Image: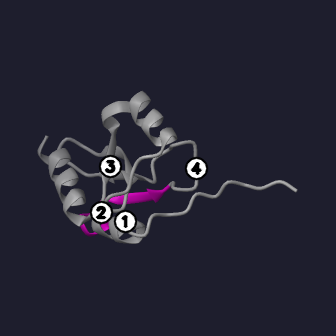
């Protein structure tokens, strides 16, 4: 018998997605990709055109796994880690004002 690894969404996953969507961002759920790939891909509209960001969702006090740390180490600043609505707002503002 073989098993397929199916990552579980963080408890705040739906809240984070809703926060991005409330700020007129497009969200693609990728939490089941595995291998440290971030939980969502977000398209943020700016005056300069759309910006695509990889976003790792963590609960308050949640730690990044080894595979997530490795992915972030390889992909760098295009990965943002958020845990709450305030993090989402700060991320979107930073991209839109940057």
The 10 Å Cα crowd at callout 3, few under 14, some 14 to 19, many 20 or more, is some
Are circles 4 and 2 on residues that touch, CB within 8 Å? no
Relative to 79, is 76 above or below? above
| 59 up-or-down from 36: above or below | below
Q: Where residue 53 appears, x then y in whole percent?
A: 34, 45
Mark 1 element type? helix
Q: Identify the residue at the far top of this view.
A: 74
Total numbered circles = 4
Q: Earlier in the sequence, mark 1 or mark 3?
A: 1
Q: CA distance from mark 1 to mark 3?
A: 13 Å
- Any magenta on residue 25? yes
Seen at 33% across and 37% down, the residue is 78
* For the residues bearing labels 1 and 3, Cβ distance under 8 angstroms: no
Residue for badge 1: 17
Tell me whether the residue at label 2 lies in contact with that at label 3, contact meaning CB atoms closer than 8 angstroms: no
In front: mark 1 or mark 3? Answer: 3
Residue at image point 36% right, 62% down: 59
Q: Circle 3 sits in a helix, a strand or a loop, which is it?
A: strand
Which numbered disc, 4 or 3, marks the residue closer to the eye? Answer: 3
Horizontal side of residue 86 vs 79, given as left or right:
left
Residue 76 among those drawn in magenta: no
In x, y percent, where is residue 8? 55, 62
The quarter of the image holding the N terminus is bottom right
Q: Secondary structure at mark 2?
A: helix
Residue picked out by circle 2 = 20
Label 3 belongs to which residue?
A: 81
Residue 9 appears at what percent x and percent y?
Answer: 50, 64
Q: Residue at x 37, y 50 (%)?
A: 55
Check disc 4 and report the residue beneath it: 33
Q: Which residues are magenta?
A: 20-29
Which badge, 2 or 3, is on the more N-terminal residue?
Answer: 2
């Amino acid at each position: 018998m073989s098993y397929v690894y199916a990552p579980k969404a963080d408890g705040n996953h739906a809240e984070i997605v809703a926060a991005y969507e409330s700020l007129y961002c497009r969200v693609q759920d990728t939490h089941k990709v595995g291998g440290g790939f971030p939980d969502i891909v977000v398209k943020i509209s700016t005056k300069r055109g759309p910006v695509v960001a990889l976003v790792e969702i963590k609960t308050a006090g949640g730690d990044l796994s080894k595979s997530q740390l490795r992915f972030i180490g390889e992909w760098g600043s295009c990965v943002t880690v958020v845990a709450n609505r305030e993090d989402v707002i700060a991320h979107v503002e930073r991209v839109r004002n940057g």
